[in-house]
């Protein structure tokens, strides 16, 4: 996800603005997320605890070795990346986490919360990691919001790449072809995401060119933004590319939305980790590279139709 304080790229959900990408309400002042929904253990291994035959178990911090679990925060409403189905949190991120758990010898346990409250909750110790389509960018790394220091920042282990996409009602009644066409129009977006920031940046570009600003309607969750577009209250919505594409394929049997133009400002999604937990970041980086090398990563992305976001190698804090 792309968000200014957590899920998604500079103009992206890239969930980039969000990013930071996933990443992540009450903006950055909340330290405990409300409206938490427990997801069951997603993947992992049966052999957890103080000893494990998993190849990277010894790389983990002792606290996590002893617990046998990695507590992961997410905002589970971004199919196909992470969403709830049958009372469980499923999607690309939970499947990747399960594969990482096999390499690390621990289980990832996901909990869903409000997106822009995720990073504060990570820094408060509620979670060990965040995995929520959060765009890795410098602002999140450094704990900045609109240039102001609001927290210690986080480290990211990059595992996917995505950009910002514009989606509209099926049939595109307002003939929107790109984010530049939104000058003077109403656009819906989830609050705290990098794609909200993308709209703000574009709105300024509109007024600098002598055009009307974008009327940006920001919502606490992405479902509300989608509903606004579907009802015609907003001419378009902005989201992470894989999420917008999935919506266009599945919502109302493919009859609700369509994606217009190309994705822009593509950037990495990262697993967010507290800056004081370098040992965990390093272990996760090795685990991501291990599932890339053995082909598991590719199979997961193919399962969800998310191959466009594949990377060749993990990185720590690769976002700009």
Image: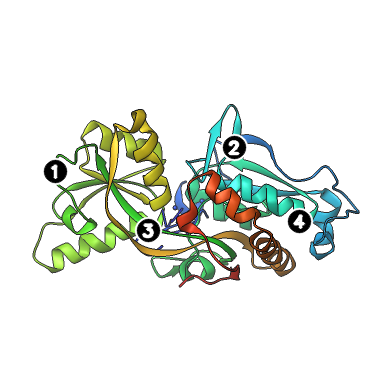
Determine whether 314 is above or below 22 in the image: below
Q: Disc 1 or disc 4, which is closer to the eye?
A: 4
Residue 267, how many percent across, how many down? 44, 65
Instruction: Give whichever of discs 4 and 3 has the lower sequence position.
Output: 3
> Going from the N terminus, do you reach mark 1 or mark 4 first?
4
Name the mark on residue 12. 3
Along the viewing direction, whichever of 138 and 28 lies nearer the viewer: 138
Numbered circle sitting on residue 174: 1
Where disc 3 sits, the SS reads loop
Q: Are marks 4 and 3 in contact (CB under 8 Å)?
A: no
Q: CA distance from mark 2 to mark 1?
A: 35 Å
Query: Which element carries disc 4, helix, strand or loop?
Result: helix
Q: Which-is-in-front pick, marks 4 and 3?
A: 4
- Spatial distance from mark 1 to mark 3, Cα to Cα? 22 Å
Q: CA distance from mark 1 to mark 4?
A: 49 Å
- Can the viewer see residue 31? no
Residue 171 lies left or right of residue 308; in this view the side is left
Q: Quick one: label 4 or label 2, which is nearer the N terminus?
A: 2
Nearer the camera: disc 4 or disc 2: 4
Q: Which residue is mark 2?
A: 89
On-image quarter of the C terminus: bottom left
Which of the two discs, 2 and 1, labels the residue nearer the N terminus?
2
The answer to whether marks 1 and 3 mark residues whose Cβ atoms lie closer than 8 Å is: no
> Mark 1 or mark 3: which comes first in sequence?
3
Residue marked by disc 4: 103
Question: Horizontally, is 171 left or right of 1 in the view?
Answer: left
Circle 4 Cα neighbour tier, 10 Å, few/some/many (<14 / 14–19 / ≥20): many
Q: Residue furthest left?
A: 210
């Amino acid at each position: 996800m792309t968000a200014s304080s957590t899920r998604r790229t500079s103009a992206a959900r890239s969930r980039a603005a969000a990013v930071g990408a996933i990443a992540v309400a009450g903006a950055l002042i909340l330290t405990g997320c409300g409206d938490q929904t427990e997801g069951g253990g997603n993947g992992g291994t049966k052999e957890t605890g103080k000893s494990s035959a998993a190849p990277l178990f010894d790389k983990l911090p002792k606290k996590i070795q002893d617990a046998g679990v990695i507590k992961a925060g997410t905002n589970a409403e971004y199919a196909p990346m992470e969403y709830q189905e049958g009372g469980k949190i499923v999607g690309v991120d939970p499947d990747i986490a399960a594969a990482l758990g096999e390499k690390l010898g621990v289980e990832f346990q996901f909990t869903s919360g409000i997106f822009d409250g995720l990073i504060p909750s990570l820094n408060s110790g509620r979670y060990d990691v965040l995995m929520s389509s959060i765009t890795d960018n410098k602002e999140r790394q450094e704990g900045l919001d609109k240039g102001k220091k609001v927290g210690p920042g986080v480290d990211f282990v990059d595992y996917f790449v995505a950009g910002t996409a514009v989606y509209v009602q099926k049939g595109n009644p307002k003939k929107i072809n790109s984010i530049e066409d939104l000058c003077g129009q109403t656009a819906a977006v989830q609050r705290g995401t990098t794609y909200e920031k993308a709209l703000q940046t574009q709105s300024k570009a509109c007024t600098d060119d002598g055009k009307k600003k974008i009327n940006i309607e920001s919502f606490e969750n992405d479902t509300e933004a989608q509903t606004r577009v579907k009802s015609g209250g907003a001419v378009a919505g902005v989201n992470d590319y894989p999420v917008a594409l999935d919506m266009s394929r599945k919502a109302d049997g493919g009859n609700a939305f369509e994606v217009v133009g190309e994705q822009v400002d593509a950037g990495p999604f990262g697993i967010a980790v507290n800056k004081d937990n370098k040992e965990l970041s390093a272990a996760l980086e090795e685990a991501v590279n291990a599932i890339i090398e053995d082909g598991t990563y590719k199979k997961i992305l193919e399962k969800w139709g998310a191959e466009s976001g594949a990377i060749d190698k993990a990185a720590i804090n690769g976002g700009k």
